[in-house]
Image (tube, grey):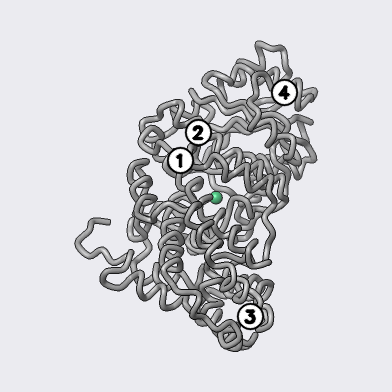
């Protein structure tokens, strides 16, 4: 960890698995040293796809050979039109790792990293990651998002022991991938706001270390979207650092709360539904970016409501019964697997009337402090849209293939797909979720933009 700054050292000392991170132009040359220090093995194998082999894989192999490290034949994945994140592919990689008794080095972005992460877990070996794009926050996170029998699942597996993020490599990735990563990172604003609320209402106490790792420098990391688009090294470094820090914060906390809130619930919903534009699946980061704007607009609306006027006991008495909840879910999710998932998740967080009343009393009593903390955390929704446009990403739902009507309906659906307590649950407790959505999409509301180009 030569020249490692205090921020990264602090994050690494709290992380469960990752021991070493390099982020700098040209740091691929450090790979052999990093391997010897953090991942000693008798043999290594590079796993890449056609593009990432050309971007960094071949050079990484040269470095290993020059340093006298033994390697097995590289695994270069090839699939048309692109390599897919499938558990069976990961298991095939795991079999190769077992045959060669080799420690894998994932050279690639989201899909290659997830495949290798799970393959390494199956083969019982640590792995090292060489990111080729600042496209998402999964590099330093545990768990891999892979499809199994058609369903996308997060499979349990350990994070990499080391990450070598060469900014010269990352700058050669298509510019749009930086926009995806930026979308994933901007969502952390909402993750922070949701956690502030969940903490204040006694639902999920803030874990100060992981919270600070993500939130303390977020504004600086997001500060130059145009620079990310132009692939300016300092801007890419900020973005990459933020994405890696989010992964380390999740390792330290033990789940994704520090990096994922209601913004991600919109994204997960749309990803489960395989939304696409011109036949191309929409990236995770693009979905998160729109999810973030959706929630910040909802928070703005919430902050305009008068909480002194609410009657917690009366509102709590309206808490839906388990049967009513089941009916709501079945009506909201025509796809059986999504309805089944939503039933499990929503039941895990469904409040009893007593619980709801307690939350609402806290909200009413502490609203001034809570709304101040939310104000401090959240920029305006319109500002986030502007940043997304500057980075070259979509900033409106129709641009990712989600119609206005669907977008409006998805506020209620996003709440139901995950057990995490967020701003959506607060709106629901208040009996205001529906009204908020109606007003956000009505003439004069945030999402009413007839005539404005999406
Ligand atoms: Zn994400």
Name the mark nearer the viewer: 1 or 3.
Answer: 3
Residue 193 versus residue 114 in the image, above or below: below
* Residue 53 x, y percent position in the rendering: 54, 28
The residue that appears at 42% across and 63% down in the rendered structure is 300
Question: Residue 79 vs residue 446: left or right?
Answer: right
Counting residues from the start of the chain, the first of labels 2 and 4 encountered is 4
Residue 347 versus residue 276 in the image, above or below: below
Kindly report the distance in space between the C-alpha atoms of the residues bearing marks 2 and 1.
7 Å
* Residue 419 x, y percent position in the rendering: 64, 67
Could you say which is closer to the camera, residue 46 or residue 313? 313
Element on which disc 3 rests: helix
Element on which disc 4 rests: helix
Kindly report the distance in space between the C-alpha atoms of the residues bearing marks 3 and 4.
54 Å
Quarter of the image for the C terminus: give it.
bottom left
Q: Which mark is residue 35?
A: 4
Q: Which mark is residue 222?
A: 1
Kindly report the distance in space between the C-alpha atoms of the residues bearing marks 1 and 3.
37 Å
Counting residues from the start of the chain, the first of labels 3 and 2 encountered is 2
Q: Residue 238 carries which label?
A: 2
Counting residues from the start of the chain, the first of labels 1 and 4 encountered is 4
Q: Which mark is residue 357?
A: 3
Element on which disc 1 rests: loop
């Amino acid at each position: 960890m030569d020249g490692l700054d205090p921020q990264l050292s602090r994050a690494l000392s709290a992380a469960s698995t990752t021991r070493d991170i390099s982020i700098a132009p040209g740091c691929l040359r450090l790979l052999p040293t990093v391997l010897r220090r953090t991942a000693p093995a008798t043999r290594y194998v590079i796993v890449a796809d056609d593009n990432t082999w050309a971007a960094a894989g071949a050079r990484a192999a040269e470095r290993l050979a020059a340093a006298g490290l033994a390697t097995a034949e590289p695994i270069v994945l090839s699939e048309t039109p692109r390599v897919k994140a499938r558990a069976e592919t990961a298991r095939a990689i795991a079999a190769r790792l077992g045959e060669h008794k080799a420690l894998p080095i994932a050279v690639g972005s989201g899909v290659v990293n997830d495949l290798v992460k799970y393959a390494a877990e199956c083969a019982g070996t640590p792995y090292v990651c060489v990111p080729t794009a600042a496209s998402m926050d999964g590099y330093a996170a545990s768990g891999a998002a892979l499809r199994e029998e058609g369903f996308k699942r997060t499979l349990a597996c350990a994070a990499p022991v080391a990450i070598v993020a060469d900014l010269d490599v990352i700058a050669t990735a298509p510019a749009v991938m930086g926009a995806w990563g930026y979308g994933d990172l901007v969502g952390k604003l909402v993750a922070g706001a949701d956690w502030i609320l969940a903490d204040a209402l006694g639902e999920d106490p803030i874990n100060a270390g992981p919270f600070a790792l993500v939130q303390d420098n977020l504004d600086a990391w997001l500060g130059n979207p145009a620079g990310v688009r132009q692939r300016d090294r300092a801007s890419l470094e900020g973005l990459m650092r933020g994405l890696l820090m989010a992964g380390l914060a999740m390792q330290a906390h033990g789940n994704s709360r520090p990096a994922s809130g209601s913004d991600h619930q919109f994204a997960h919903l749309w990803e489960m539904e395989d939304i696409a534009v011109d036949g191309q699946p929409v990236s995770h980061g693009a979905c998160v970016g729109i999810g973030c704007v959706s929630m910040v607009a909802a928070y703005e609306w919430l902050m305009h409501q008068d909480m002194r006027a609410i009657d917690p006991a009366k509102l709590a008495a309206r808490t839906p019964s388990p049967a009513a909840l089941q009916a709501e879910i079945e009506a909201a999710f025509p796809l059986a697997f999504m309805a089944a998932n939503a039933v499990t998740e929503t039941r895990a967080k469904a409040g009893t009337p007593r619980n709801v009343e307690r939350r609402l009393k806290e909200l009413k009593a502490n609203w001034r402090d809570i709304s101040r903390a939310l104000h401090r955390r959240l920029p305006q929704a319109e500002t986030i849209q502007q940043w997304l446009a500057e980075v070259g990403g979509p900033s409106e739902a129709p641009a990712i293939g989600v119609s206005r009507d669907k977008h409006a309906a998805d506020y209620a659906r996003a709440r139901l797909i995950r057990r995490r307590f967020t701003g959506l649950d607060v709106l629901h407790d208040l009996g205001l979720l529906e009204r908020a959505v109606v007003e956000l999409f009505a003439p004069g509301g945030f999402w009413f933009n007839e005539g404005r180009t999406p």
